[in-house]
Structure formats: C-alpha cells, structure tokens
Image: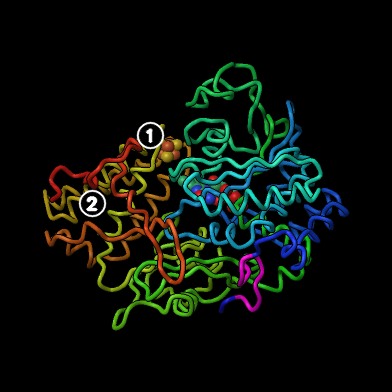
Amino acid sequence: MIARSAHALPRQPISSLLEHLEAGGLDGLRRARALGPDATIDLIGEAGIRGRGGAGFPAGRKWRGIAGALSNRGGRFVVVNAAEGEPGTFKDRALLRANPYLVIEGALVAAATLSAPRIVIATKASYRTELQAITSAAAELIAGGHTDGVEITVVEGPDHYLYGEETAMLEVIEGEDPLPRHLPPYQYGLFTTSPQLGWSAGSGPSAGGAEANPTPDQADNPVLVNNVETYAHVALVCRNGADWYRSMGTDQSPGPTIVTVSGDVQRAAVAEIELGQPLGEVIDELSGGPGSGRTIKAVLSGVSNPALTADKLDAPISHEHLIEAGGGLGSAGFIVYDDTRNMVDVAYQVARFLHVESCGQCNPCKTGTGDITTALEGLVAGTGEPSAHLTVIERRLTTVTDASRCYLPTQAKQLVASLLRLHPDDLAERLAGRPGDLDVVLPKLVDLADGVAIVDPRQHHKQADWTYRETPVRFSPNAR
Ligand SMILES: Cc1cc2nc3c(=O)[nH]c(=O)nc-3n(C[C@H](O)[C@H](O)[C@H](O)COP(=O)(O)O)c2cc1C
Ligand code: SF4
C-alpha cells in the first residue's frame, strides 16, 4: 500500500545538498534546462501531473497558460504554496521537513521554464521546523551555484486558512492580509504597477490607480502558484520521465501522492502511496483503522469536498474515483470519524471552522456560514427550536455562495449538506432534541509525529474577526 520505494517523501530526511545529489538530486533541473521551456512543459503535460494543492488542476496546462501570457510590465514569478492549512493535512510539512531540496529543485525548473527571475516560498511564521529546513536548503543551493541567478525569497505568513488560497497568498506576499482577489494569479500577479481600481481590499502596491485591465494574453506580472508537492513531482518527472510517473496511479490521476490519516484511528499517519489504492485499505494499513470494536462511519477529505460514507471505502484514491463516490481527493488529508459520532456534531465543527476563517469580503459567505454555525450549534446543544434551526440551515445553504470571490463557501455548502443528507438518523436524533457533543475534534494539525497528531489548541479560541479570545468561543447565545 505504501509506495514501493520512496519518491518525493524519503524514509529518512534528506538534510544536506550532498545527500540530495547522492539521491539523484538536480538531475531533473539539468534535464529541464537542456530540454528548454517548450519540451519541459510537454513533459509535465505527458506525465499528467495534477496539482497537489486540492483542486487537481493539470500542471502542464497551467504552465502552458503562463508561458503564453505576455507580461505587459515586469517579470513572471514562481510561488511555492507552502501554507498548508487544510484540516487533516500534514503532507506538505512532512515533505518540507524531509526533502526541501526536491521542492526547490521543482521551483527552479519552473523558473527556468517560465523565465522567472524570482521564486517566492510562502509558508507560515509558525512553521518553524519547515522554515528552517527550506531556508537552509535554499542557502545551500544558492551557495552551490545551482540557482542560475534566480532570487529565492521565503515569506513567513499568518496562520489564517485563507492564506493558502492562491490570490490571498499574493496579497500576503505584498504585505497585506490574506483577502482573496477577483483575478487569478496567471492574470494579475505580484507587485503590479498599474492596478485595477477596486479589486483589492488592501492598500498595498496593487490597490490604487485605475489604469490597467489586463486580459489573459497580456497579464500583469503573471504568477505561477503551485503546491509544495506539485513542485517535488515536477523535479521527479524531469529526472525520471513521464512513463515512470504514469507507471503509478490511474490514467486520470497518475503518480504517487502523500496522504495524511487522522481522526478516530489508532494512530495518525502521513505516508506516500501510489494513487489508485482503495481508501479503506490505505486507512487501515497506515493508521490501524478505528479503535477496537468501532467501525468507520464517515471520511472527510479535509473540509473541501463532500463527505464519504463507509460503503465507499472500496473506492480507489484518485480524483475521478472519489468524485464518482460522491466526495473528492482534495489534498488527500483523510479525517476518519467512527460510529460513536453524530455527523450533525461534525457538521457544526466544519461550519464553525469555515465561518471563522471566512474573510467577510462577501456578505453571504460570512453571514451565511455564521447563521449555519449558530443553527448547528443550537441543534447540537439541544437549545432553541430544532425545526427552526433546520430551516435556517436549509435557507442559508442556498445563498451562502452568492457573489463569492473564492471557493470557501462552496466548501461549506457541499460538506455541511453532505453530512446532513447522508446521515438522516443523526439529524433525526438532533431534531428530536437529543443534545450532542459540541467538542468533536476537527483536526487542524500543528504537528504529526510517531503516530500522534497534535491539533491546534488555539482554533477554538479564534473569533470570526480573526482575533483570539482567552476562553473558547461559542456562537449560539443559547448554547451551554
Ligand atoms: C480556502 C482555500 C484554502 C486553500 N489552502 C491551500 C493550502 O493551504 N495549500 C495549497 O497548496 N493550496 C491551497 N488552496 C488551493 C490554492 O488556491 C491553489 O489552487 C493551489 O496552491 C494551486 O496549486 P496546485 O495547482 O499545485 O494544486 C486553497 C484554496 C482555497 C479556496
Ligand atoms: S467567499 Fe468568503 S472567504 Fe472567499 S473572499 Fe468572499 S468572504 Fe472571503
């Protein structure tokens, strides 16, 4: 089940450039430089690398679009999305700890291919171990003369979930808060000199002025944003070829991937597998499955896809198979809930997380997730009129995505609706007034080692305005 040999994630961390070179490191970069931009993008397209940040967008297509966009101002930028904030996911931090050289090598391939003079590695200030690993790897690569003059900057961003959303990430790189933009990175990038009035909530370099309205074929400093793991795969494909990559996984989801398993399991785990393995077998092998005498009731892939029920555990782990099963692969962070859980209680945690993390630029998103959270909290606490709570939830689920700039409210809608729809007995129990558990854990992970997942203790203290309170926050005035 675990990948036959390590690909991106080595068994032992690679802690020096010498070790990276001994493992075949920089062969991929040399090959890409020899191939040139066109052939490198073809190679990535033939391999079928899909982005590992959640949506699974084909990397070759993204790179081709940026290579074709004529920059009307300055240069192109390559951004490594190392924000990893999806609940239940620890794969990017595992990779940054164990193989930072491979990630930077992939970003250097991108810089060479797109003629980008600058790479920005955007991670979180709180990820101290990863920051140390990536910073010293970058310094070694620069000192070794392997970067071809490309500047590498490491940005230490905030803990907010939205920081991982690619346009919010560009705002943070420019020194602003993580507030998503209207325009995508390939169209409107970093440090532009002719901003489009009114699209940015911040006051930084992209906020004022009324001059430009870039079109896709004439972009303003276009930026490539890919996930940490995607860059590692780029380096491996350049080293080993497209056939090697396609010898793993499925036709539509080729290659290996790093999965995280947490929740109601015997041990939390992060490991590299080849795509196409059955979900239930992977959970069992990596985590030992649920506790003694318990069975799996539901599996979430972070908070970005509808939930899966136990009868879908045979589904192979791939984009297409998990979508067919009613869920999605996301960033392969599988959160397991066992048969002791009521899924209304889980839905409350999901709604609450997304409401708190919503930035409030779009009113239906912030107020809608807020109303859903309050109503679910009432149902779980057993306070108020249950049918009135349900009416609020149903109504807000139809409007929460209205006029949304980003995907966050769609996540709320899909996941909350799926948990309630797929578990009618659980809903009936709460509608009958039976109180539940207000403290089910939605594992926003701060560490994962030796089978133990550490969940962020501050998340329940975070308020909807992104400040923290000393005591845990309750959203419903009636909740106990
Ligand atoms: C609310 C939200 C949070 C996100 N968080 C992350 C994240 O932590 N890490 C990440 O790589 N992508 C995250 N994404 C996806 C990015 O916007 C973007 O699609 C991704 O970095 C592209 O890389 P890829 O094509 O290599 O997957 C998030 C998206 C949304 C809507
Ligand atoms: S949809 Fe929600 S999270 Fe996204 S930008 Fe709008 S308010 Fe912010």
> Where on the picture, by quarter, is residue 204?
top right
- Residue extent of the magenta highlight: 3-13
Q: Which colour scheme is used?
A: rainbow
User: From the Cβ of disc 1, is ligand 2 less than 8 Å away?
Assistant: yes
Q: Residue furthest bottom?
A: 293
Q: Which residue lies furthest to the right in this view?
A: 34
In the image, is 135 to the left or to the right of 416? right
Q: In x, y percent, where is residue 234?
A: 71, 57
Residue at disc 1, secondary structure = loop
* Residue 376, label in figure: 2
The amino acid at mark 1 is: Gly
Q: In this view, does 70 lie above or below 388?
A: above
The quarter of the rendered structure image containing the N terminus is: bottom right
In the image, is residue 379 part of the stretch drawn in magenta?
no
Q: In x, y percent, where is residue 76?
A: 72, 36
User: From the Cβ of disc 2, is ligand 2 less than 8 Å away?
Assistant: no
- Which residue position holds label 1? 360
* Residue 213, label in figure: none
The amino acid at mark 2 is: Leu
Number of marks in the image?
A: 2
Q: How crowded is mark 2: few (under 14 residues within 10 Å), some or many (20 or more)?
A: many
Residue at screen point 28% across, 73% down: 339
In the image, is residue 4 part of the stretch drawn in magenta?
yes
Foreground: 14 or 374? 14
